[in-house]
Amino acid sequence: DIVLTQSPALAVSLGQRATISCRASESVRSSMHWYQQKSGQQPKLLIYGASNLASGVPARFSGSGSGTDFTFTIDPVEADDIATYYCQQSRNDPLTFGSGTKLEIK
Amino acid sequence: EVQLVESGGGLVQPGRSLKLSCLASGFTFSNYGMNWIRQAPGKGLEWVASISSSSSYIYYADTVKGRFTISRDNAKNTLYLQMTSLRSEDTALYYCARIAARARGVMDAWGQGASVTVSS
């Protein structure tokens, strides 16, 4: 199975840039996707195919990378962005998720 | 508006069975593959099972293979997960999620989840 590694937490000031990384144990090409999960809510798709913004998602969110190293960025961070962010790969079965990065406000 | 509403969760003893349902609305259910994803309390997301739009292709995580069965009824716009021989480690919030069209493995809509607790 492909293992996705994310840092557990990140603290950022409002209005600043938040950058979350996800490293895959083997190449997933561009089959990396990002989800936001707010407390008590279901996950929401933000980015698919490494860099494509999902429908209705603000342009403050972006993604980049290919192969094994991926980055998810929020710029600028707003108070409503407090959540856990998960990367997920669909290159190989089974689908796997990173362990999530909890975004906190400084 | 796309909606997915899970039901059927609850408290069940180890070794017993439970069947989850996911009622879809706001889109043509029969055109989309579907996933079940679960999240243990305080933990991350785990893919459980997938089914293609016409039920031709079905896949399971190794952790549930042989115990869980995913199915769908396109006439009723409903996805199911039959869970048998439940274990404590199956305790989780179970989400149904729609697989995006032309984007393999991308889940573009999620339900609110059904809570399953396996305990004696």
Image (spheres, coloured by chain):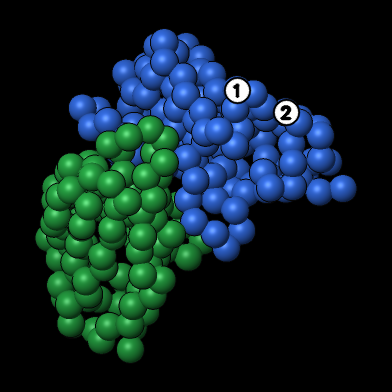
Evaluate whether residue B94 shows in this view: yes
The structure residue drawn at horizontal position 69% and vertical position 47%, both measured from the top left corner, is B89
Image colour assigned to chain B: blue
The chain whose colour is green is A
Measured in 3D between alpha carbons, the distance from the residue under mark 2 to the one under mark 1, in whole angstroms, is 9 Å
Label 1: which secondary element? strand
Evaluate whether residue A35 shows in this view: no
The structure residue drawn at horizontal position 81% and vertical position 32%, both measured from the top left corner, is B16
The structure residue drawn at horizontal position 45% and vertical position 27%, both measured from the top left corner, is B50
Is residue A54 depicted above or below A10 in this figure? above
Label 2: which secondary element? loop
What amino acid type is highlighted by mark number 2?
Thr
Other-residue count near label 2 (Cα within 10 Å), few / some / many at <14 / 14–19 / ≥20: some
Between B29 and A100, the one lying in front of the other is A100
What amino acid type is highlighted by mark number 1?
Thr
Residue B54 location (% of width, % of height)? 40, 11
The numbered mark, 2 or 1, whose residue comes first in the sequence reads 1
Instruction: Report which quarter residue A78 is drawn in.
Output: bottom left
Instruction: Report which quarter residue B84 is drawn in.
Output: top right
Is residue B82 depicted above or below A83 in this figure? above
Q: Residue furthest right?
A: B120
In the picture of the structure, the residue carrying the numbered disc 2 is: B84
Are the residues flagged by discs 2 and 1 in contact, CB closer than 8 Å? yes
In the picture of the structure, the residue carrying the numbered disc 1 is: B69
